[in-house]
Amino acid sequence: MAKSIVISSGHGKYIRGAADILDEVDEARRVVDTVAEYLQSAGCTVKTFHDNTSHDQSTNLNTIVNYHNKQSRDLDVSVHFNAYQHTSKPMGVECLYVTQQALANTVSSKIAAAGGFLNRGPKKRTDLKFLNATDEPSILIETCFVDSSADADLYRKKFDPICKSIAEAISGQAIDTGPDEPDEPDVPDTLPPEDERPTIGKGDVGPYVEQVQTSLGVVPVDGDFGGVTDGAVKGFQAAVGLTADGVVGPNTWGELDDLDARKASGFDGLAESLVDDICELAGNSEIANYSWRERGKMPKGYTQGIALCFALAQTWLTDGDPAAARMARADTGNPDKDALSWYRSKFQALGMSNAQSGIDTLRHLFVMMLGLGPRESSGRYCEGRDLSATNVESDTAEAGMFQTSWNIRSCDNTIEPLLELYWDNPNGFLATFQNGVTPDSNDLGNFGGGDGAKYQFLSKFAPAFHAMVTALGMRSLRQHWGPINRSEVELRSEADEMLLQVQSLVGDAPEPVPPSPELPTITITIDPPGSARVVIVGGAEVA
């Protein structure tokens, strides 16, 4: 189905933007008009807008937003150009978003490939009028830097392919414009070679700091290498086996490039439209506004993120994943090990039965997890270890919203493979969990090295990984969590109602599987030749 799009240029005729080698307002208008032509050729309905009347910034922003909101459309797009300082170095393209991370990533990647730009990637920005005030999904494109001669040269040479790439990314369609243009010399679309990138550390500022912050998921992306960024760099260095000194030099740049590549080639596991629907549902649910006992309301992203993790677990269960099957198995009847058994009477009081393996038990497990987070971290995905505790080995240091440590892996053999799975594909709904949360300088550092440090890093960089590990641990080692042991975790029917709606959005789930008794192990031996003896382990010998 063809999309309806409204696309506007940033700033205005009398409210000028950045100007250096390129003029932001003039070039944004060129891009908007050309992209609109390409979109129309792809069958899209397009309306364009340039502000020619406003004489102050507030009026300018209101005029642009009001025009968008008066139109019937599927997507709002604003085109801008970036600026920092006059330089000959490549600076690159980025795309800003609040809810449209996947689309922003696609747009940035396609522009980078078409123009040969450094790809700065998608950046979540919650402080921009256009992204916050437009009623429909929106993105803001920063095409390149007006004060970079390298960017300006590429932009001029590749203007049409850049505009075409924007239209293809937005429309989701390939656009045929006839014979291909002659190939230009290859220009890298990633960061400059390591020996051209500066070594940076605490106290530095600028776009290279922004790149580090974007790569490591540090919010806000403000270009200031302060305590939070320092902690994030040190935590990442520990995870990849480098000296955790907080200095971003050639080796750390290389590891960041590798992280970016793995993240870009991976996938959170849910379609973008489903993610948006679930976030809207969860964000407006009763449980999102519930004041948890002694903890108050959780960050909006916490409730939304857990809803996404449940949806992902549901898809795993549908696909026959062994880890999801372990999460969804019936109450084991072992309260010393199984959190669902320990809380059986509380579940029964709310009419939640876990007597059968399947989607209902899986959902109830996530209901309990939703109540565990407020006790352990106040719903903060980035929570570092309890600094008053002495558990500072890499395997015992707690991390993440559930304060789970890597030694939990010993309780279930489906946990350890998740580390490799998420290390190779470190996508785990980070942008959602960040909604309403800002890390502090004690959060993003890690302790020790090896797999334990990797685990701590991934718990905060890919929160879905941390949720899945915790879900498995709760079924086999519930004494790992003090709030569960002390029966402090609240179970709320509102949580179950919300997750049941999520379950419906995801689609049909497997039928519940009735619990089955343990089958005896049977050994057949032939002794003496020609006779058989059957031995049932744990039982009697049968001739």
Image (spheres, grey):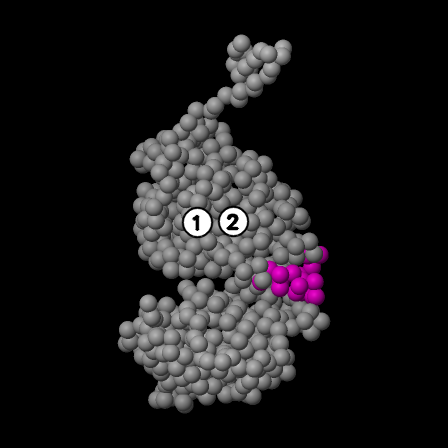
Amino acid type of the residue that numbered disc 2 sits on in the rendered structure: Phe
**Residue displayed at 33% across by 70% down:** 2
Badge 2 is on which residue? Answer: 465
Q: Position of residue 511 (x, y in %)?
A: 35, 38
Marks 1/2: CA distance? 11 Å
**Magenta-colored stretch includes residue 247:** yes
Q: Is residue 314 above or below residue 259?
A: above
In the rendered image, residue 231, in percent from the top left (x then y), is placed at: 61, 58
Asked which secondary structure carries label 1, the reply is helix
* Residue at the (34%, 75%) spot, across then down: 43
Picture quarter with the N terminus: bottom left
| Label 1–label 2 contact, CB within 8 A | no
Which amino acid type corresponds to the residue marked 1 in the rendered image?
Answer: Leu
**Quarter where residue 25 is shown:** bottom left
Q: Which residues are magenta?
A: 243-260
**Which of the labelled discs sits on residue 312, or is there none?**
1
